[in-house]
């Protein structure tokens, strides 16, 4: 065969005659168009298209073509495209080169090596000879078309490297998603299955129609419901505002969840935005909120709402060593993370923010779908202080250059604005709620006071004296000890993260029924109950913590406003027992609370008290501790050729944890899913079914249970330790979940709050 007539292939199948192999020029062309379509939502199609055309350029080598036939070891097929991009397109070509070189292995650092070979090292490495036919099969755009930033891209002089790093990551997302889809569709054709259809989801207009029908049933049959209806109407009236930064400051019980959803749909439709992304602080309430939205959308709910939260590893590279092989590529597709192409996404803050600082293809694949969206940041005050400045900078950048509207939605609005004194804080944030201070006064339902210091017996005495009471403490060991102290009392019950979510839901169902029937209910819980749990008691005892946590606790007291505020108390206490001391980070919040408490003792939850509390926290921390890993300084010291993608991904961790998931076979649904898992073609759907049955354990306790053979892996030959299930049922109790008496377990449990 002459060199001119040689055919070049991107992907192979089993037939040796190559009759159904995928032609390389077709793959590159299709990926280029898909990537350009992805990037069009932030006006960067001109940058993404050549990335798609160049990403597999190294397959125009004899070495790679032999590899497809099984005649050659692994070949670097990504670096040639990165070289050409840098050569042809200069500075912007260098940004493109990061994504092209890393479209399988991930984004590497520009210069300083971490784990991966740096981009500069790869660009200088010796490569197989690139055959000249690529120039006749690929029509690259001229440099003049490429040498410009996206239209209306605004440069901020104090964060240029941050901006270029995010732009690179967004372009990388466009490329890897396009590559996943085209490769997936090729193998689908080979298997006789239809290509993926990205148009089968309901439109935002259809969803709004269903939501309007649901809201039309709303009756203003009480003062609280009439107030909620007024809030909803006012918030929806703000939808015509230009995309950008918003706040929604509504007290607990004011209906902000559905109000924010309605605003988001109205706003997205008014401005041609594509989807609504709800970012929720805790995994435990993602499922709950997603179900609220599904019910609001009626029969369209199941196809409209995508939950993305998982205790299980969602990185396909963990299970696939050779993406060229058909069977493994099929498994790769089945394990691939969702790319967020649904109209409504419900996810966690960890998933959202860590993905936006990530370096792996599987984590970054969805990022381009954030552009042109409305992002509702629920309970905005819960963002971790150690990464607060990078998070704020990121939110500002998304609104500035990616047509994203951000809504900071909370009852306790953090002081993140530039006007609040927050360094490089948010500017031009528009409030959606009608007069938050007046709303607070009208929805005030509780009286907050400090009891001082209580020993264990005094605290138990408070619980014995009251028939319906909630007590929230700062760690699981304290909750268990307190429950043991009052277990003989009528209605004594206990909630802990050592129970799986399904178990907690069942307990909450029983509690709500007891409250409805006016029966005794003495509930001991950790702070998990503050995370959006709809429950209403006349008295709440709260171990001393930050003022925002106390406000969340107050949301479980007189929630429906059926009692007078004077008869609905939130009692804050300090614990005398050093065994129950809060960890250092909670101590700082409590210290800030003590600092503002004397000034606002008459009304501790007033907006001005909340604002003073957050200012105090940020002042105590200082700028450095609000970016504890120094990510902004690291980027400020970087240039286009030295962007530190690996360092950013490894250092940006919202939650520093070594927690490991263990599946509890709590009911028939869990047992059935575990029984099917060893024989499943793919684990994605089963993993989602098992999510509500997971308990997270510290590594030391996890290891001890493993050594005792109390937990075992399901099909470790396929999944490794991906799915660990409890096989000793005696270690799971209906009153307090997973438990143990082994000293190793007890020592490990002291690490967890």
Image (spheres, rainbow, N blue to C red):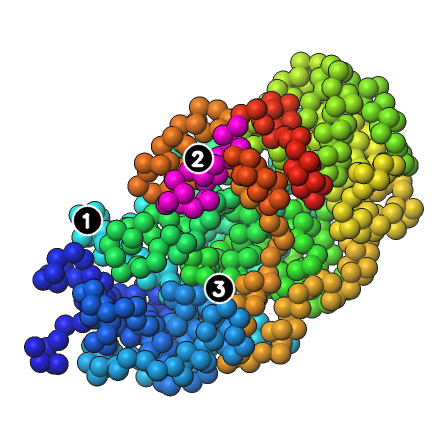
Mark 3 falls on what kind of element?
Answer: loop
Q: Is residue 156 visible?
A: no
The number of numbered badges drawn on the structure is: 3
Alpha carbon separation for disc pair 1 and 2: 27 Å
Which residue occupies 40% across, 27% down? 672
In magenta segment, residue 723: yes
Q: Position of residue 543 (x, y in %)?
A: 80, 37
Q: Is residue 744 shown left or right of residue 4?
A: right
Q: Is residue 724 visible?
A: yes
| Magenta stretch in the rendered image | 710-728
Give the answer, above or below, for where 595 lies relative to 71.
above
Q: Which residue is mark 2?
A: 689
Tag of residue 359: 3
Give the answer, above or below, for where 133 lies relative to 381.
below
Badge 1 or badge 3: first in the primary sequence: 1
Q: Position of residue 152 (x, y in %)?
A: 50, 73
Q: Which residue is mark 1?
A: 191
Which residue occupies 24% across, 54% down? 326
Which of the pair 585/64 is nearer the observer? 64
Q: Is residue 536 shown left or right of residue 325?
A: right
Q: Is residue 199 shown left or right of residue 459?
A: left
Give the answer, above or below, for where 24 lies relative to 439.
below
Q: Is residue 603 shown left or right of residue 554?
A: right
Q: Position of residue 535 (x, y in %)?
A: 66, 28
The quadrant of the rendering that contains the C terminus is top right
Which of the pair 498/607 is nearer the observer? 498
Q: Are marks 2 and 3 in contact (CB under 8 Å)?
A: no
Q: Position of residue 130 (x, y in %)?
A: 26, 81
Mark 1 falls on what kind of element?
Answer: loop
């Amino acid at each position: 065969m002459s060199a001119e007539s040689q055919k070049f292939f991107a992907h192979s199948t089993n037939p040796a005659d190559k009759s159904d192999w995928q032609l390389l020029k077709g793959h590159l062309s299709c990926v280029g168009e898909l990537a350009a379509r992805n990037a069009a939502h932030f006006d960067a199609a001109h940058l993404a298209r050549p990335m798609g055309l160049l990403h597999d350029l190294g397959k125009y080598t004899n070495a790679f073509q032999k590899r497809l036939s099984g005649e050659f070891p692994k070949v670097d097929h990504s670096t040639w495209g990165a070289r050409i991009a840098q050569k042809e397109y200069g500075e912007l070509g260098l940004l493109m080169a990061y994504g092209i070189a890393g479209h399988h292995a991930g984004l590497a650092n520009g210069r300083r090596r971490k784990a991966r070979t740096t981009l500069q090292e790869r660009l200088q490495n010796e490569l197989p000879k690139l055959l000249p036919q690529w120039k006749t099969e690929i029509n690259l755009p001229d440099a003049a078309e490429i040498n410009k930033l996206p239209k209306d891209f605004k440069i901020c002089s104090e964060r240029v490297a941050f901006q270029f790093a995010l732009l690179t990551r967004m372009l990388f997302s466009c490329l890897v998603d396009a590559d996943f889809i085209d490769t997936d569709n090729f193998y689908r054709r080979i298997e006789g299955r239809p290509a993926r259809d990205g148009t089968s989801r309901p439109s935002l207009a259809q969803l709004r129609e269903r939501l309007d029908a649901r809201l039309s049933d709303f009756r203003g049959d009480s003062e609280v419901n009439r107030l909620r209806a007024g809030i909803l109407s006012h918030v929806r009236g703000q939808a015509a505002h230009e995309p950008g930064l918003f706040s929604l400051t509504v007290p607990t019980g004011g209906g902000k969840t559905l109000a924010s959803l309605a605003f988001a749909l109205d706003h997205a439709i008014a401005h041609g935005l594509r989807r609504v992304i709800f970012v929720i602080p805790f995994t435990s309430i993602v499922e709950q909120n997603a179900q609220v939205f599904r019910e609001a959308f009626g029969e369209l709910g199941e196809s409209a709402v995508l939950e993305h939260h998982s205790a299980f590893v969602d990185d396909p590279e963990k299970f696939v060593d050779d993406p060229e092989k058909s069977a493994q590529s099929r498994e790769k597709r089945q394990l691939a993370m969702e790319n967020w192409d649904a109209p409504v996404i419900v996810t966690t803050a960890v998933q959202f923010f860590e993905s936006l600082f990530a370096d792996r293809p599987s984590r970054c694949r969805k990022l381009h779908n954030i552009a042109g969206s409305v992002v509702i940041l629920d309970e905005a005050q819960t963002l971790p202080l150690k990464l607060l400045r990078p998070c704020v900078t990121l939110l500002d950048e998304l609104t500035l250059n990616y047509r994203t509207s951000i809504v900071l939605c909370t009852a306790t609005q953090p002081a993140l604005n530039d006007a609040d004194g927050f360094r490089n804080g948010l500017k031009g944030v528009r409030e959606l709620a009608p007069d938050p201070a007046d709303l607070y006064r009208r929805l005030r339902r509780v009286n907050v006071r400090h009891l001082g210091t209580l020993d264990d017996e005094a605290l138990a005495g408070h619980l014995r004296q009251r028939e319906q009471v909630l007590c929230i403490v700062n760690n699981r060991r304290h909750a268990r000890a307190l429950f043991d102290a009052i277990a003989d009392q009528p209605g004594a019950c206990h909630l802990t993260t050592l129970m799986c979510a399904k178990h907690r839901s069942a307990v909450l169902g029983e509690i709500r029924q007891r409250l409805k029937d006016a029966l005794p209910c003495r509930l001991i819980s950790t702070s998990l109950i503050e995370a959006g749990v709809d429950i209403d008691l006349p008295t709440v005892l709260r171990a001393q913590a930050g003022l925002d946590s106390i406000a969340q606790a107050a949301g479980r007291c007189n929630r429906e406003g059926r009692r007078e505020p004077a008869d609905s108390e939130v009692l804050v206490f300090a614990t005398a027992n050093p065994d129950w001391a809060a960890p250092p980070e909670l101590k700082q919040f409590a210290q800030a609370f003590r600092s503002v408490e004397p000034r606002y003792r008459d009304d501790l939850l007033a907006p001005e008290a909340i604002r003073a509390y957050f200012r105090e926290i940020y002042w105590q921390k200082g700028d450095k501790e609000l970016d504890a890993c120094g990510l902004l300084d690291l980027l400020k010291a970087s240039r286009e050729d030295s962007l530190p993608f690996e360092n950013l991904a490894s250092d940006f961790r919202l939650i520093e944890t070594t927690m490991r998931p263990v599946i509890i076979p709590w009911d028939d649904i869990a047992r059935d899913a575990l029984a099917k898992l060893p024989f499943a073609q793919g684990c994605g759907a089963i993993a989602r079914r098992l999510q509500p049955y997971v308990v997270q354990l510290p590594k030391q306790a996890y290891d001890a249970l493993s050594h005792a053979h109390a937990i075992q892996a399901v099909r470790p030959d396929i999944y490794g330790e991906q799915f660990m299930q409890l096989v000793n049922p005696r270690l799971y109790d209906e009153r307090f979940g997973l438990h143990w008496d082994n000293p190793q377990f007890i020592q490990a449990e002291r690490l967890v709050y």
